Image (spheres, helix red, strand yellow):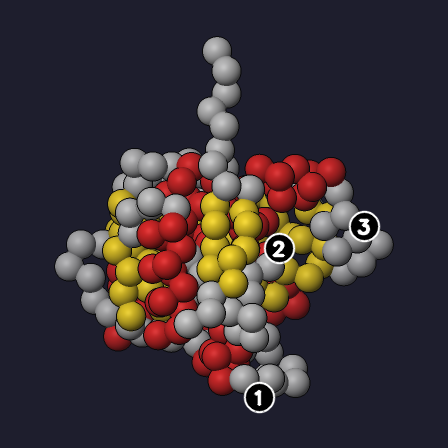
Amino acid sequence: MTKDIKQTLYLFQYKNGYRYNSDSLVLYDFISTFKPKGKILDVGSGSGILGLLLKRDFPNISLTQIDIQSSNIELTCKSAKKNNLDSKVLHADVRECRFSKKFDFIVTNPPFYHKGSQKSKNEDLKVSRYADMLPFNELCIAVSQNLKPRGSFIFCYDAEQIDCLLNILIKNRFKVNYMRFVHTKENKKASIVLIHAKKSSKSLCKILPPIYMNSNEVEYIYKNTKTESLLCLS
């Protein structure tokens, strides 16, 4: 039996806007290990990369993507149409949303640059990058309100803020089930952390082996995701 050959995922991006990077690809690979199913919410969809990769590789999921920026909604819609992938795309602030039917998985690559970072003058980039545009505690409350009991919340974040993340997750009745740190090189400190948390879970936390961005594993992730950027001119 031959393996299914994945179709390239085409993603529209603006020349001067926020552009997806390796964080989204590594996060997607992490999410895929949990075999997502049911209703999935992709928060802060951007170009659509995270949710559309999941829909391509797990076609039976019901995908909803949400973003606060109209420019990103345009990208998500164009990318979904280009790849013939079904997604319900919403222009809204997740903090103001109460969905009638809760989700099995909520996934996100949220803005996490901290207050000390020098901010871009580009307003779209500010919203996409900086944590004060969507504080993690506010994101966590919104996720808790829209996630099924024992549903999965999977995301990446700045590794140096791990103490704050864990404190906020616990306050919102989440338990971290899996955690994996990402390093640029073996002799460098972790740059981001990948977290799989569940509501009201009693499982112990498993710290998975680290990811090194210069490794064969990451080279495989790049090849396996098969993404290609397209310039959005409008």
Name the element at disc 2: helix
Q: SS for tag 3? A: loop
User: Which circle's residue, 3 or 2, is located before the other in the chain?
Assistant: 2
Residue 122: x percent and y percent?
54, 84
Which element is circle 1 on? loop
* Inter-mark Cα distance, 1 to 2: 23 Å
Q: The disc labelled 2 sits on which kind of residue?
A: Ser
CA–CA distance in space, label 3 to label 2: 17 Å
Q: Give the distance between the C-alpha atoms of the residues marked 1 and 3, in whole angstroms.
A: 34 Å
Q: Residue at x 39, y 46 (%)?
A: 83
Residue type at numbered disc 3:
Glu
Q: Residues within 10 Å of mark 1 (few under 14, many from 20)?
A: few
Question: Do tag 1 and tag 3 residues touch (Cβ < 8 Å)?
Answer: no
Res. 216 image quadrant? top right
Q: Which mark is residue 121?
A: 1
View extreme (right): residue: 187
Q: Would you say residue 215 is visible in this rendering? A: yes
Query: Mark 1 against mark 3, which lies toward the viewer?
Result: 1
- Say left or right for 59 vs 176: left
Kindly indicate whether the residue at mark 2 contacts the one at mark 3 (C-beta within 8 angstroms). Answer: no
Location of residue 29 in the rendering, given as x and y in whole percent from the top left corner: 54, 43
Q: Which of the two marks, 3 or 2, is nearer to us in this view?
A: 2
Kindly identify which residue carries mark 3.
186
Numbered circle sitting on residue 86: none
Residue picked out by circle 2: 22
